[in-house]
Each structure stands twice: as C-alpha cells, then as structure tokens.
Image (cartoon, rainbow, N blue to C red):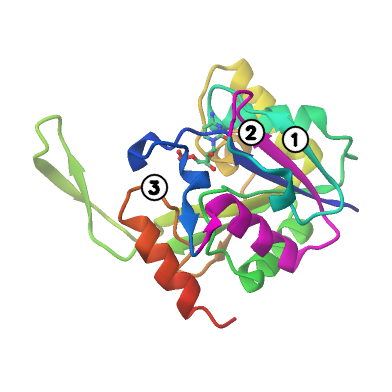
Amino acid sequence: RALWLVVPAAGQGRRMGADKPKQYLMLDEQPILARTLARLYQAFPHATLVLCLDADDRWFQPDWVPFAHWQRVPGGTERMDSVLNALHAMQARDNDIVMVHDVARPCITPGDLRALYQAASTHAGGALLAMPVADTMKRANAEQLSTHTEPRDGLWHALTPQGFSYVLLRQALESARHQKRVVTDEASAVEALGHQPRLVSGRRDNLKVTHPDDLALAAAILAAQTD
Ligand code: C5P
C-alpha cells in the first residue's frame, strides 16, 4: 500500500500582498515551499510526491524537492482542481493512501504527520488533522453585526494534511466537481458521499501562512519546535 503526498502549490496567495506567490517567500533563508517539502520528507522519505504548480510558475526550483520519486502537475482554477489534476496524473492503486498537504503549512511536524497517516490508513472514511475551536463563535449579518453566538461544542478547525484511500478521494472530488460544488478541503467532498472522516487532534502551531504577519509567526514557531 503505497503512500502518495499531494501538495497543492498553485495558488497566488493574494492575501499576502507580496510580489510573488506566498510559497516562494523566504522563511529563515529558505522558501516556504522548500521548508514544507523538507518536513514531509523527514516523516515519509519513501513516499511519492505530486506537486501542483501553476503552469506559468517562474519561481520553482526542482532542487528544492528532496524526494527520489516525484512529479509535477499543473494547477487548476481552484484548490480542488489542482488536487484533482494530481489524482488524475498519478499512477496509484485504489487502496493506496493519499495525503494532501497545503504548501502554506510549513510548521507541520513529523509527529502530526505520522499520527494522521496512522488514522488515514486504518479508518475507512479517511482522516484529517484538526483543532477544537477555542474562541466563542459569532454569526454576523451583512452589516457585520453579531446576530447570535454559535455553540462551539463539537466545532473544529480543519487543518492539513488530510488522508484518504486513493479511490475514495478521487470519487469524492470528481463527484463535487460534477455537481459544481467548490470544496475548500478534501474532507468536505468525502463527507458529501456519506463518509465520516476521523478528526485527529493536531498541534496548534500548524499555522497556514496567509497574511503578511504570519511569516514572522511561522519563523518563531519553527525556531521553537524541538520535536
Ligand atoms: O490560498 P490558500 O492558502 O487557501 O490555498 C490553500 C492551498 O491550495 C495553498 O497551498 C495553495 O497554493 C493551493 N492552491 C492550489 N491551486 C489553486 C488555489 C490554491 O494549488 N488554484
């Protein structure tokens, strides 16, 4: 049962307001993309990587890829299209495990990666790293006025990686696309087929670099991580 790592890295990262996509911004003297791939490699040196990159990408350098087995596929319009391109390009068997990890999460740890892999390969509905919601959740109207408070019991933040059998993930994303539903993570598509992915409690420092302030935060997290 082979392990495939799909890394969608074809986004523009516009919320960063930088002159290049955020995966190419430097984090401690290395581009975010290289940092993320290094963490994945640390946990799974024998996996095959499928990297989704924009067809017009001018920044990517192949020597940032530590994996012996890897392929590049073009990104799509939405994140889910990029992931589907990867699933269609790779020569996987139905039962192989596919773990999808955002390039923008460079602080992922080997411990969380292994925990997620373990859950994804033993639970039929797959699994995702997630974090229980800590703040009180407000529902706002169009005027940004708080109309009520959502009970936060049972609410989780969805993180990545998310892992599923190849056949389930492909069926789920193809079905979402067929129904013209845009999903922002793999688990949403799998849930829509009636499956229940397992939530694996992940570290709070698995930050998604999104806004300019996040770069300094990610650098501080990397410096503080000892395991
Ligand atoms: O923009 P955001 O951080 O939500 O994107 C999540 C991930 O999906 C990023 O790793 C980004 O590069 C990737 N992505 C993609 N193809 C797109 C849009 C986003 O691979 N069309």
Identity of the residue drawn at 59% across and 30% down: 57
Q: In the image shown, does 59 or 83 lie closer to the viewer? A: 59
Q: Amino acid at mark 3?
A: Thr
**Looking at the rendering, in which quadrant would you find the C terminus?**
bottom right
Residue corresponding to mark 3: 210
Horizontal side, residue 79 vs residue 12: left or right: right
Tell me which label, 2 or 1, sits earlier in the chain.
2
Residue corresponding to mark 2: 53
The secondary element bearing badge 3 is classed as loop
Mark pair 1, 3: CA separation:
23 Å
x and y percentages locating residue 8 in the rendered image: 61, 39
Q: In the image shown, does 226 or 17 lie closer to the viewer? A: 17
Q: Is residue 191 visible?
A: yes
Give the class, few, some or many, for how many residues have Cα within 10 Å of label 3's Cα (few <14, many ≥20): some
Which segment did they paint magenta?
Answer: 29-58
Q: Amino acid at mark 1?
A: Arg
Identity of the residue drawn at 44% across and 71% down: 221
x and y percentages locating residue 182 in the rendered image: 50, 26
The secondary element bearing badge 2 is classed as strand
Give the class, few, some or many, for how many residues have Cα within 10 Å of label 2's Cα (few <14, many ≥20): many
Picture quadrant of residue 15? top left
Mark pair 2, 1: CA separation:
7 Å
Identity of the residue drawn at 33% across and 48% down: 211
Above/below status of 3 relative to 60: below
Picture quadrant of residue 36? bottom right
The secondary element bearing badge 1 is classed as strand
Q: In the image shown, does 196 or 46 lie closer to the viewer? A: 46
Identity of the residue drawn at 43% across and 55% down: 157
Above/below status of 134 relative to 68: below
Number of the label disc, if any, that sits on residue 72 = 1
